[in-house]
Amino acid sequence: MKALSIQQPWAWAILHGKNIENRTWPTHYTGQFLIHAGKKFDHFGYNWLLENSDFLPLKDPIPFKDNYPMGGFVGKSNIINCVDYHPSSFFLAPGVLC
């Protein structure tokens, strides 16, 4: 099975409603993949999530910084398609979205 290493809090966000992963390269792979939470924490991303939480399709409240598992596999998700635009509030142009 394929895996993708992602910094927290983004690994958590994918498991709790983030429906877009912004990448600058496309993938031809579709299907399930494992989510690996890296050992680094994206503090800027955490603040962005907090500031935009009212507009994001997250299923759960955003945890405090110390409550994220790091340095291991935390779950799995699916790649359905790669697109160059999506109406999701997680869309950050420019780039390829998977």
Image (cartoon, helix red, strand yellow):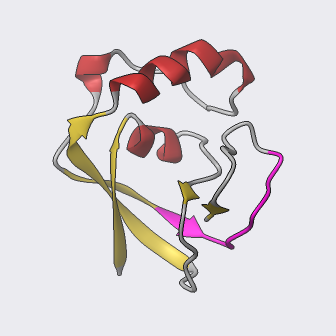
Left or right, 17 with respect to 7, comes to right
Image quadrant assignment for residue 39: top left
The residues colored magenta run 77-87
Q: Main secondary structure of the magenta part?
A: loop
Left or right, 55 with respect to 73, comes to right
Please check the rendered image and state whether residue 32 is part of the magenta-colored stretch, yes or no: no
In the picture, the quarter occupied by the N terminus is bottom left
Residue 84 or 73: which is nearer the viewer?
A: 84
Residue 57 % position (x, y):
70, 33
Residue 80 or 28: which is nearer the viewer?
A: 28
Q: In the image, what residue occupies the spot 79% across and 53% down?
A: 86
Q: In the image, what residue occupies the spot 63% across and 52% down?
A: 20
Residue 40 % position (x, y):
21, 38
* Residue 61 visible at all: no
Q: Farthest residue toward the bottom?
A: 28
Residue 45 or 79: which is nearer the viewer?
A: 45
Is 67 above or below relative to 87? above
Left or right, 50 with respect to 9, comes to right
Please check the rendered image and state whether residue 83 is part of the magenta-colored stretch, yes or no: yes
